[in-house]
Amino acid sequence: MRYNRTIDFIKGLYLDKSFIPLHEPKFIGNEKKYVIDAIDSTYVSSVGEYVNKFESMMAEYIGCKYAIAVVNGTAALHMSLLLAGVEPGDLVITQALTFVATANAIKYAGADPLFLDVDLDTLGLSPVAFRKFSKEIDLVNGVAIHKKSGRRIKACLPMHTFGFPCKIDILADICKELNIALIEDAAEAIGSEYMNQKCGSFGLLGTFSFNGNKTITCGGGGIIVTNDDELGPLAKHLTTQAKIPHKWFFNHDYIGYNYRCPNLNAAMACAQLEVLERFIQNKRETAEIYEQHFIESEIEFLKEPVKSKSNYWLNSILLPDLNERDRFLEETNSAGVMTRPIWTLLNKLPMFSACEAGELNTSLAIESRLVNIPSSVRI
């Protein structure tokens, strides 16, 4: 087989397991201890000390005033869009090359995604594409209006793809000029940094995921982070069914959401956060090993962008073309080495095919060539 050398290399890297997953969770710390403690407390749902601890640990780690624990990353995105004032009929700028949850959350809010291109070096929303598209926007009484459709553009939702920070500072400047709320989809980028600042902390709001395949996990779970003194407390209130605190009366003042993270999940999250930096260091070492393996190859290993420190959640390679990509996928998966192509561009999916989209030349090129390779922590 053409890719035997790389298959053997990955099997050696992961100790010749019969099946090597793309990214499996690792539990090496206090996970069982904290979960049992949460069970013994009888507070297993959305009220409990581990929820509070999880939030305080995340706020300190990311460097934000507020962190609100929710059931998953998609709920974090949905709530953040609502907090930013996105309403039915609005448009939200995002990238076509992203996981479907990014656009799904926009639809949950009654808005439509407007897809722009990405940069090859970051795999994230391109400031050049955004700047070019800004010529199609009018500012009317401080409101960004899409000239073609007459619809309001309320938010911009870039993603830090596979843990690579996008050029979030430039995107933030453009959003400020256009009075568009910036929300970071940092689901895959916990611990990643851009210009020595944690991903998720640049925008009005940032979101994270703790799904089972992420760098750290609590089975599900998500986090919203913000420095906004109004939105932080409001996020906690709305995700707790908007219940007005009282010892016994059930009164509510908004449409609320049952989005709060259960204490059991938060207990596991606290334990995983304690070993996060160890995991990131291990994953960065793995990335260096991969880089050396592919250095003399026709396969290009994607390195972290400039000004960035990536958590290398999923290591990624570029094959020469679509045929070689598919051959690589077939050979590796048949040999028990799990590899996956990047997502289908969202504007190609039937539920998003009618959405506005700019030129997506870079996104299309990446879609046809990129493959994720095994990236689990090797501890």
Image (spheres, rainbow, N blue to C red):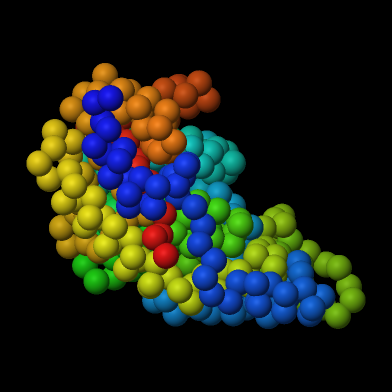
Q: Position of residue 139 (x, y in %)?
A: 31, 45
Which residue: 12% across, 45% down? 295
Q: Is residue 39 left or right of residue 58?
A: right
Looking at the image, residue 1 sits to the left or right of residue 31; the answer is left
Q: What is the count of numbered marks?
A: 0
Where is residue 235, by image quadrant? bottom right
Quarter containing the N terminus:
top left
Asked if 141 appears above or below 64 in the picture, the reply is: above
Percent x, y of residue 68: 57, 68
Q: Residue at x 33, y 65 (%)?
A: 282
* As drawn, 129 above or below 82: above
| In this rendering, position of residue 249 left or right of residue 64 | right
Q: Quadrant of residue 33?
A: bottom right
Residue beneath the point at 54% across and 75% down: 29
- Judge whether residue 225 can be spotted in this image: yes
Q: Please identify the quadrant where the C terminus is shown.
A: bottom left
Task: Please name whichever residue, 224 or 35, is drawn nearer the observer in this view of the structure.
Answer: 35
- Depth order, front residue of 345/351: 345
